[in-house]
């Protein structure tokens, strides 16, 4: 677990010098292709009660989009920060989410906003190489971590989310 904490510290801060985050809680590890990654994401979104924050590079998964829409209908506050490539795609998840009343922001301050993160109720963190796409589930070699019970780690991801949110602009269909 110390290795995972050090690895996550490096991923979050970009430097190995930062103090490691103490491992707490649980970590569920999933792999694709066909490893149940999409189902795990849908399950966690289905358990959301208050808030879902999404950072996504590519997002074309219908089951995940539907789970987000269902969560919104339950009264869960949802917001997404997505890569600028979603602006030029004919009908992207940004369009679907925006048309569904979910606020979408476009992060165009980087060559690629390559984050793949979902934060649920400020308590569950979903992250890994897994893009929220059909290909990521059925064809690609991907990984996903579902981390629960590590408040300090989630807080760092929320801080990163808010930093990117701060320099993003509203998606304009």
Image (cartoon, rainbow, N blue to C red):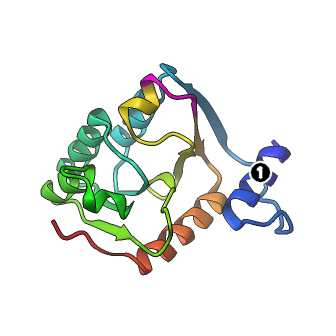
Q: In this view, does 152 lie to the left or right of 132?
A: right
Residue 41: in magenta span: no
User: Is 10 left, or right, of 117 in this rendering?
Assistant: right
* Residue at the image position 35 percent from the left and 46 percent from the top: 59
Of 151 and 5, nearer the camera is 5
Specify few, some or many for label 1: CA neighbours under 10 Å numbering under 14, 14-19, or 20 or more: some
Give the residue at x 34% y 50%: 49
Most extreme residue toward the top is: 34
Q: Quadrant of residue 65?
A: top left
Taking the view exactly as shown, the residue that stands out farthest to the bottom is 167
Quick check: 5 left or right of 131? right
Residues in magenta? Answer: 138-142
Image quadrant in which the N terminus is located: top right
User: Considering depth in this image, is 140 or 130 the residue closer to the camera?
Assistant: 140
x then y, percent, for residue 130: 51, 39
Q: Dot 1: what SS?
A: helix
Which residue position is annotated with label 1?
Answer: 7
Residue 17 against residue 25 in the figure, above or below: below
């Amino acid at each position: 677990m110390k290795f995972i904490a050090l690895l996550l510290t490096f991923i979050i801060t970009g430097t190995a010098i930062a103090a490691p985050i103490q491992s707490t809680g649980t970590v569920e590890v999933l792999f694709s292709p066909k490893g149940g990654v999409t189902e795990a994401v849908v399950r966690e979104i289905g358990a959301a009660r208050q808030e879902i924050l999404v950072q996504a590079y590519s997002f074309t998964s219908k089951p995940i989009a539907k789970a987000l829409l269902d969560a919104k209908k339950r009264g869960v506050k949802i917001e997404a920060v997505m890569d600028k490539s979603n602006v030029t795609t004919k009908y992207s998840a940004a369009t679907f989410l925006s048309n569904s009343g979910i606020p979408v922001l476009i992060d165009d301050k980087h060559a690629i906003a390559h984050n793949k993160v979902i934060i649920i109720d400020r308590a569950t963190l979903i992250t890994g190489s897994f893009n929220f796409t059909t290909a990521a589930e059925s064809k690609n070699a991907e990984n996903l971590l579902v981390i629960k019970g590590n408040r300090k780690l989630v807080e760092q991801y929320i801080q990163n989310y808010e930093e990117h949110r701060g320099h993003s602009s509203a998606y304009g269909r």
